[in-house]
Structures are given as structure tokens and as C-alpha cells.
Amino acid sequence: MALLDLLKHRKSVRNFLGRPVEREKITMCLEAARVAPSACNSQPWRFVVVDAPPLKNKLCDAAFSGIYSINSFCKMAPVIVVVISEKSNFLARIGEMFRGTKYYLIDIGIACEHFVLQAEELGLGTCWIGWFNEKAVKSVLNIPQRKKIDILIALGYYDREKLGSEHDREPIDKIASFNAY
Ligand SMILES: Cc1cc2nc3c(=O)[nH]c(=O)nc-3n(C[C@H](O)[C@H](O)[C@H](O)COP(=O)(O)O)c2cc1C
């Protein structure tokens, strides 16, 4: 698929099929994330792929209960990818300090979108998940509490028929201009 078609084809999936996802496909998505650019080539990420059903269920129960239960649809997803925001390298951190820009979040965003788009190309659905019980995720996966987890990705096969058709987005003339603000 041409890139723009792929971008327009992708939509957040919140209704997954039970079918397990092949490790080779997950690895391709990880490879797509691996080659993402990052400030000072810092690569401040680590991906923990949770696809073992008992652990995945335990993770979802912990991550999406109480005030986070709006995301409990993730329990249907056969794979949850936990993205740990690792410490950036020295140069990137110096840059962050001087510019007041969280480069590491930009980096994580790009890497995750690479992952998501590769998944889309493989016929897999994803949903970015920013609303979850971070502390509980760390406890279940024995990730040190001092680490930061900014985002999860739910991944799995899905039924395209159950997705809406249109993207709800602002028109180009509202979000961009040439040669002036
Ligand atoms: C950083 C980020 C966090 C998000 N967190 C959630 C979330 O916690 N739960 C959810 O259902 N969708 C979440 N989304 C998905 C957005 O709601 C979705 O991308 C947006 O509404 C546009 O719809 P589309 O992805 O289908 O084009 C998140 C997306 C991003 C980029």
C-alpha cells in the first residue's frame, strides 16, 4: 500500500479477535520501531511484549481497573506492548534542558507510530493507550517503579467491518499554512 493510503487506512482498534498474533509479525513491528529516528540517536525506549495469555490477562486486570476501566476493551487484545521510556543519552538530556523540550517523548511517539504502521501493513490493528495504571503495570511485570511508562500499545487481529469509516480530522487549511502563521 502507498504510504498515504496506509496512513488513511489505520484507525484505532478497540474490538479485537481472539486470534493470536504470530511472533514473526510482532518482531517486524519491533524492527520498524527499532529504526525510528530519535534526538541525538538516543533511542530512549524499551518494548516489553506481553503475549502469554495468563500474564496478559493479569496485566490487563491490573492496568485497566477502577478509573482506568474505560480501556478495559484492551482485555480482548491478544498482545499488549508496554513501552518503557528509558533515560535519554547525555547529549539529548542537555538539549532537553536548554530547549525545555521533552525530546524523549517525541522519540517514543515516532517509534510507536513506526510500530503501529508496520502492524497496519501486516493487517493487524492497534490502539495507543495512554490511560492506564502505571504502577500496577510495573508491579505485574517486575519493572522497577523508578522507570517511566508513558504509553502502551494494544495489538491484535480485528474485524474491519466494526470500524467507522471516516477519520475525524481538521481540514488542511485549519492546521497548516505556507510562509506565515
Ligand atoms: C498518545 C495517545 C494516547 C491515547 N490513549 C488512548 C487511550 O488511553 N484509550 C483509547 O481508547 N484510545 C487512546 N488513543 C487513541 C486516540 O483516541 C485516537 O488515536 C484518536 O481518537 C484518533 O482516532 P484514530 O486513531 O482512529 O484515527 C490514544 C492515542 C494517542 C496518540
Image: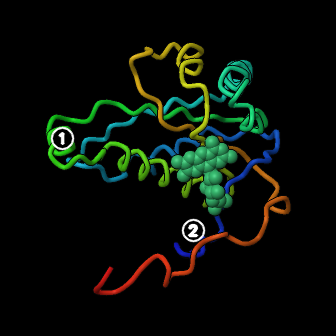
Q: CA distance from mark 1 to mark 2?
A: 33 Å
Q: Is mark 2 within 8 Å of ligand 1?
A: no
- Judge by depth and name the residue closer to the eye, 133 or 128: 133
Residue 110 horizontal/vertical position (percent): 41, 53
Mark 2, Cα crowd under 10 Å, few <14 / some 14-19 / many 20+, is: few
Q: Which mark is residue 137?
A: none
- Judge by depth and name the residue closer to the eye, 29 or 62: 62
Where residue 135 sits, quadrant-wise, is top right
Residue 123 horizontal/vertical position (percent): 68, 57
The answer to whether residue 122 of the structure is visible from this angle is: no
Looking at the image, is mark 1 or mark 2 nearer the viewer? 1
Q: Which residue is mark 2?
A: 7
Inspect the image, locate mark 2, and give the three-letter code of the amino acid beneath it. Answer: Leu
Which of disc 2 and disc 1 is earlier in sequence?
2
Q: Is residue 86 left or right of residue 76?
A: left
Inspect the image, locate mark 1, and give the three-letter code of the amino acid beneath it. Answer: Met
**At x 56% / y 13%, what residue is drawn?**
139
Q: Is residue 48 left or right of residue 156?
A: left
Q: Which mark is residue 97?
A: 1
Above or below: residue 140 compared with residue 46: above
